[in-house]
Image (cartoon, coloured by chain):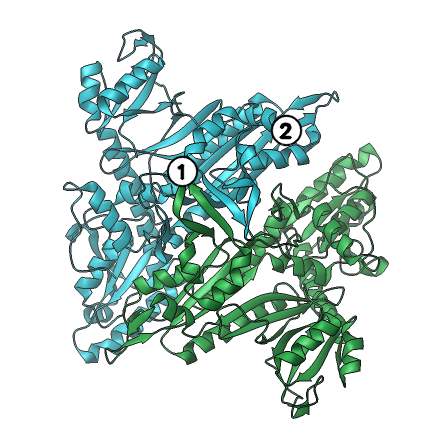
Chain colours: A green, B cyan
Amino acid sequence: MADEKKLTPRDQDYSAWYNEVVQRAELADYAPVRGCMVVRPYGTALWENVQQGLDRRFKETGHQNALFPLLIPMSFLQKEAQHVEGFSPELAVVTHGGGKELEEPLVVRPTSETVIGYMYAKWIRSYRDLPVLINQWGNVVRWEMRTRLFLRTAEFYWQEGHTAHATFEEAQEETIRMLNVYADFAINDAAMPVITGRKSETEKFAGADASYSIEAMMGNRWALQAGTSHNLGQNFAKAFDIQYLDQNNELQYCWTTSWGVSTRMVGGIIMVHGDDQGLKLPPVLAPYQVVVVPIWRKEGQKGMVLEATERIRAELATRFRVTVDDREEHTPGWKFNEWELRGVPLRIEIGPRDVEKGSVVFARRDVPGREGKSFVPMAGLANAVGDMLETIQADMLAAAAAYRDANIHQAVDYEHLKAVVADAWARAYWCGDLACEAQIKDDTKATNRNIPLDQAGAGPGVCVVCGKPAEEWSYWARAY
Amino acid sequence: MADEKKLTPRDQDYSAWYNEVVQRAELADYAPVRGCMVVRPYGTALWENVQQGLDRRFKETGHQNALFPLLIPMSFLQKEAQHVEGFSPELAVVTHGGGKELEEPLVVRPTSETVIGYMYAKWIRSYRDLPVLINQWGNVVRWEMRTRLFLRTAEFYWQEGHTAHATFEEAQEETIRMLNVYADFAINDAAMPVITGRKSETEKFAGADASYSIEAMMGNRWALQAGTSHNLGQNFAKAFDIQYLDQNNELQYCWTTSWGVSTRMVGGIIMVHGDDQGLKLPPVLAPYQVVVVPIWRKEGQKGMVLEATERIRAELATRFRVTVDDREEHTPGWKFNEWELRGVPLRIEIGPRDVEKGSVVFARRDVPGREGKSFVPMAGLANAVGDMLETIQADMLAAAAAYRDANIHQAVDYEHLKAVVADAWARAYWCGDLACEAQIKDDTKATNRNIPLDQAGAGPGVCVVCGKPAEEWSYWARAY
């Protein structure tokens, strides 16, 4: 239940605002285990809609789901040198099972490249078995020191795609295909404009040849990496002997990829769209797309209003996710605040006058106050709701894109970059030198978000730090 | 890939048959971690269909999904005396996290009553918050000594419902409601006739006041407990202080339930329906309901046959889960065996003659040989497929029920019971004494499966062991 207290305004303390929204909208709560969360029914319904949007796209691009074990022998992680280095500080380790100390400790998976690589080596025999296109939905554990609900938790939920191919080119195609699948989901389902690009060497996945990400701008102008896709080259294939006989009957190593989106995406949705009233959910993903609030003052009006409400609910429920708030212990004003806090895209108010006139009131979550209200006839209501939800979805994307574009600035020199990244994103030429990247981070706390695939407008330039020749732009920002 | 070798016949070695079917149909494989499994794409697709059938029923009965943490403080399990006694021998324990030894060990959840109880105590304040009706889909770990793919694995996948109520009566209603939801799913989706009943004191869940189960008969006449529903009384409410203020503003303990179905259900589906050719999947759950096999001998026929195949596939794909096997490296006969092994309910064969005549051949998986084949006109094919799948579903349920009923015998005395349970199920009066139950188990290895809710035909009788008065029948059988 929402209490009556207002949320901390975003301008005052963004982090406090975020934590309050997550808990008071009943998306998630802290678990009694360090750094872990409980995803409550409302948050789970949102995550399930994210899952469905992604899963449908994975299947359309030829992938199948499978389930690999939670526990992985410690020795598996040690087979890929960069991988173990990247993950060992974060491992949760099972040392006892069935009352006895284990001969070999098992790690709770932080990611599954190793154990999936082991199984692929067993399953893949010939070029006819390729490509292998598998995705897994599950939970992973990383012993993070500083945690935040959805954004960084010790246990989190995600999908991890793992594919094996005959050639580098096919693996690279897959890596980019899935990056684009993520972008398509983020833009069209989450109304979250994202920038696709390559991660710098410093920021890439432990064990990848190349990593790619989708990056989104949050309401405080920080960046969030909302999905990653990795070309793993032959690193895991060599570590786990994933080999196939080619058409000439010669043994070759496979080329593998992995790609993932997690419950972090939910944190992104909260921060891209939320305002001082609370959540603002895109209609495609909202657990409830419509809330109907019946309003009456006199007991004699109640029957008529509730009857019309039920008629409307039944009509809309066949096409939309609808809830009715007819609780009598709360006032309409309390309910409006509550459902705004919870981010329901469209509220339908219906009172005795509306019933008499055969109309209802629409109130858009994304347009505050009078401007977001309109009278709509009850006749043809479902179509009007459908149109309105489409409008809201499109307007939310447009608003987020406008906000982002207004807060990205081309840095003309290093002083400018430093000023820009204090409160926005900089786009700047970078020579690729790790020292220049490290200097930016040391001076500003901003990191290289990615080197965008879209370099239209870029050309020969000079590195914003060292002045040496540079060909490509990068995005730089503070990030979660 | 299936190899050409035949499966071990069920009569010869049921256990070998089971393991071969699971692996050769590519449902699951052994993981490189003791007692764990990898659920392969075909097995995962089957499990996802099980999940959807259950999840829809949970939502129709007012439940919502949520996600609770994987890791549980060891002290939580110790709060409920029977619970910790039941589960401690099976725990996997995390002792190290982030490179350090933990102050308190964490167990990988074997089930979540404790941590969910802790959260409910935090969330529930008043009678207005009740009932709480939550389900969780996830993985759990129990350090089992003897494991078998799907039936008993150290890690398994399941759903666990956890509800809290104001009164005993409501909790009991919920317990039985969910038992009946499981039975409805088993019967109508899995074509698996089940018997609903109460578990004996010996067989009930550690921490429950009363446990109920659905029990199914496998192809070797052993029993499988395919789902359980528990009335937990106030045991966990008292252990975790789950209290609410009632309408008189007095503090009361809640009454809680839990209920679960796991990937064991997949093992049950394999064993209820499978035959010496392999899997036999019920149409409602089969990953592929229809496989279309194009057949041609001469290169000149190929185009015509493949064109008709594609037309059929496109027509059927809008209503059914269809796959086409047009691989050229395998003969039609090999493909028939392969898809029979994998249990696809309906095979459609199409050759040059069929194209000319405007018809196809249907081959039912559940009716072997000539009798299961029929010629069907291409016109109106989708309706014919729909009708045939319904017939197959109904016939599979009827066949399983007939098999079960033929293998349940009313035991007239103890000698008879011993003879019956050697190879079938006995129904017998039992006085309720633990000593009588233990004696049956010692003498025969058969256990009390359940005390059926349906006692029609039972009345005052005498215990099959001790001869004392008994009111109720129980089922007795060897069980997984």
Type of amino acid at the residue the image marks with label 2? Ile
x, y (%) of residue A479?
A: 69, 66
- Quarter-of-image position of residue B62: top right
Q: Secondary structure at mark 2?
A: loop
Type of amino acid at the residue the image marks with label 1? Gly
Identify the residue at horizontal 53%, vertical 32% (top origin).
Answer: B77
Identify the residue at horizontal 77%, vertical 48% (top origin).
Answer: A349
x, y (%) of residue B90?
A: 41, 36
Residue B242's disc is 2
Identify the residue at horizontal 66%, vertical 57% (top origin).
Answer: A267
Q: Chain of mark 2?
A: B
- Neighbor class of circle 2 (other Cα within 10 Å; few <14, some 14-19, many 20+) is many
Residue A80 as seen in the image, left or right of residue B410: right
Locate the C terminus of chain B by quadrant: top left
Q: Is residue A242 or residue B309 the one in the foreground? A: A242
Residue A364's disc is none
Residue pointed to by mark 1: A98
- Quarter-of-image position of residue B254: top right
Locate the N terminus of chain B by quadrant: bottom left
- Quarter-of-image position of residue A195: bottom right
Q: Is residue A378 depicted above or below B466 in this figure?
A: below
Q: CA distance from mark 1 to mark 2?
A: 30 Å
Query: Foreground mark, 1 or 2?
Result: 1
